[in-house]
Image (cartoon, coloured by chain):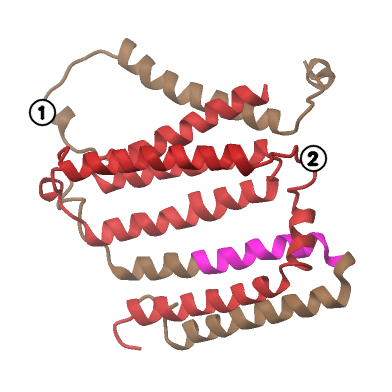
């Protein structure tokens, strides 16, 4: 088995990603259809009720979500983007040398102001 | 192999985009948007833009759609209060204009675009970084100011008292 796997030469590294995609989609779609085809159909009131890990739901699940979640998500997005910019710099770190380091320090420094601001204003606290 | 993959992922992207604008519930639209963005990421891979594909999945399909979903949950229109949209005159006009636009875009693309074959490493992290730290250095630094403005704007909007 190991011999067989190692003998296959994939021309493109993305071939394995494609294979993973096909298997993942095939399995999830396949199981939905299988449970439709093989599953017994015995419906009653309890089966139609909302399932929530064994506990009866006491309120409707569709409640208005607080804006605090949005703030956290937005702050996450911004610092996620900052991290995305760090990757190309990290790859080229040796080539760029001091110049790249100074540039990245300015970039991170400006965003650090934002982080300090968020911290001081209590945007990171959950209240 | 590549033309087949291009057609498959292109069809997924276009189909997902159509679903985004036709679903009644905004949450379904947001989830189909993820599908479209994933398919576009696959198209980026086919054009050798590996870094862009990864960023597309991490930032757009991951973080940006999460923001959309939070806004939908924040506004939280109950199912029975969603507006029922019909095929009105305006909508018909919109479809016609969209068709015209696609035609125009196709004509322009045929006339001007010269799709060179990208080399294997033209979209790698290294190539993107080299462009970022030479030709687009100012844009890169200004991006940090833009992100800073977004941080401050988000806090100003969402905090009860600053």
Quarter that holds the N terminus of chain B: top right
Labels 2 & 1 near each other (Cβ < 8 A): no
**Horizontally, is B141 left or right of B77 in the view?**
right
Is B77 in front, or is A43? Answer: B77
Per the image, is A16 magenta? no
Q: Which residue is mark 2?
A: B120
Helix, strand or loop: magenta stretch: helix
Q: Is residue A12 visible?
A: yes
Q: Are marks 2 and 1 on the same chain?
A: no
Provide residue A46's location: percent of width, then percent of height.
14, 30
Name the front one of labels 2 and 1: 2
Provide residue B114's location: percent of width, then percent of height.
69, 40
Provide residue B33's location: percent of width, then percent of height.
41, 44
Chain under callout 1: A
Chain under callout 2: B
Residue at the outermost top position: A38
In the image, what residue occupies the spot 66% across and 64% down? A85
Element under label 2? loop
Provide residue B24's location: percent of width, then percent of height.
22, 42
Q: Is residue A125 visible?
A: no
Q: Quadrant of residue A19?
A: top right
**Horizontally, is A111 left or right of A28 in the view?**
right
**Horizontally, is B2 left or right of B8 in the view?**
right
Tint applied to chain B in the drawing: red
What residue span does the magenta drawing correspond to? A77-94
Question: Vertical placement of B105 versus B2: above or below?
Answer: below
In the image, what residue occupies the spot 88% across and 72% down? A97
Chain in brown (letter): A
Element under label 1? helix
Question: Vertical placement of B46 versus B155: above or below?
Answer: above
**Horizontally, is B104 left or right of A87 in the view?**
left
Q: Which residue is mark 1?
A: A45
């Amino acid at each position: 088995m190991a011999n067989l796997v190692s003998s296959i030469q994939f021309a493109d590294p993305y071939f394995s990603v494609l294979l993973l995609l096909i298997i993942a989609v095939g399995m999830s779609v396949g199981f939905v259809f299988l449970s439709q085809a093989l599953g017994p159909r015995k419906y009653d009131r309890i089966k139609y009720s909302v399932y929530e890990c064994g506990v009866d739901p006491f309120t409707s699940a569709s409640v208005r979500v607080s804006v605090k979640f949005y703030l956290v998500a937005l702050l996450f997005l911004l610092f996620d983007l900052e991290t995305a910019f760090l990757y190309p710099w990290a790859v080229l770190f040796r080539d760029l040398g001091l110049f790249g380091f100074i540039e990245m320090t300015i970039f991170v420094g400006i965003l650090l102001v934002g982080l300090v601001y968020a911290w001081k204003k209590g945007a990171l606290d959950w209240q | 192999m590549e033309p087949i993959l291009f057609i498959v992922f292109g069809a997924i992207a276009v189909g997902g985009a159509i679903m985004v604008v036709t679903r009644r519930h905004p949450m379904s639209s947001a989830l189909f948007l993820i599908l479209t963005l994933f398919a576009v990421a696959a198209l980026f891979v086919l054009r050798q833009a590996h870094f862009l594909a990864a960023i597309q999945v991490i930032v757009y399909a991951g973080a940006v759609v999460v923001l959309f979903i939070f806004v939908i949950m924040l506004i939280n229109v109950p199912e029975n209060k969603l507006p029922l949209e019909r095929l009105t005159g305006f909508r018909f006009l919109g479809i016609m204009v969209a068709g015209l636009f696609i035609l125009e875009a196709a004509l322009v693309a045929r006339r001007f675009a010269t799709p060179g074959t990208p080399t294997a490493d033209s979209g790698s992290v290294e190539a993107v970084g080299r462009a970022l730290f030479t030709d687009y250095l100012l844009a890169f630094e200004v991006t940090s100011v833009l992100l800073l403005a977004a941080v401050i704007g988000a806090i100003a909007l969402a905090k009860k008292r600053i």
